[in-house]
Amino acid sequence: MILAIDIGNTSAKYAVINDNCEILLFERLKDCWKKAFDSIFKKGYEINSIYVSNVAGLQPELEDVIHSSNIKADWLSWDSPIGKKWLKNIPEGYGADRLAADIGAIAACPNSPLLVVDAGTCITYDVIDSKHTILGGSITPGIALRLRAMHEHTAALPLYEPEGFSPIIGTDIEGALRGGCANGVRWEIEGYAREMLNQLPGIKLYYTGGVPLVFTPEIEKFAVHDPYLVLRGLWHAFHN
């Protein structure tokens, strides 16, 4: 079994994954890495390797805990050789989470062009052709970041969490803010997907992270939502 760790700008997630790429345990980091590792071992999971995606800067506590565990760890990055085995034309500074999500999508659908959307603190859009060449992408603010920006840059708008009822037409401030952000993100992704479908017929949309979104039927036909895409991508990156 392996332990896959995804450290984002807002939170850290980890999963225990078996040799068939099945998620046996998924959790968000609550306290500290030592407690997380202790909990994993107490539950009886025998971890052979650790794979890490990190976009949040130095992680001395995690490095110390990994070192104490005596388990081999691999850290994915844009310039690591493993990434180049999966993808061509990786831009300098490409986020490890984006790279892992791309690898997860390629492993799931290796023969199609791909639009990989990771909706975390920011929303990343990666466009990959059928030969696994990164053609480019975009980055926009995520739902929580949009809500926070409106709160911090206005005098009266309150701050709301992204989870909750998101009406298309809000009848109060909360509904207007959350609905505007959540539906704006949904329409943004759908618009991007439609444009990419025109440019790359047969493209598949892989969507992960953030608040689950319900797309229109035309988009749902070629869309796959996998909340564990980054973690599965880490498994595929180093396991094959």
Image: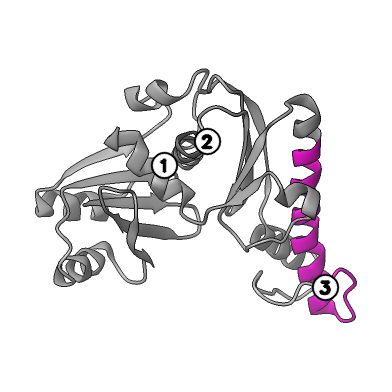
Marks 2 and 3, how far apart at CA: 33 Å
What type is the residue that disc 3 sits on? Answer: Pro
Quadrant assignment, res 32: bottom left
**Magenta segment range?**
167-194
Category of crowding for the residue at label 3, using alpha-carbon neighbours closer than 10 angstroms: few (below 14), some (14–19), many (at least 20): some
Q: Any magenta on residue 183?
A: yes
**x then y, percent, for residue 188:** 78, 48
Query: Which numbered mark, 2 or 3, is in the foreground of this view?
Result: 2
> Label 1's element?
helix
Q: Is residue 4 magenta?
A: no
Label 2 sits on residue = 109
Q: Main secondary structure of the magenta part?
A: helix
Which residue corresponds to mark 1? 233
Residue 57 seen? no
Q: Residue at x 18, y 63 (%)?
A: 45
Q: Is residue 30 left or right of residue 50?
A: right
Q: CA distance from mark 1 to mark 3?
A: 33 Å
Q: Are marks 1 and 3 in contact (CB under 8 Å)?
A: no
| Nearer to me, 94 or 86 | 86
Residue 203 in percent (x, y) is at 67, 33
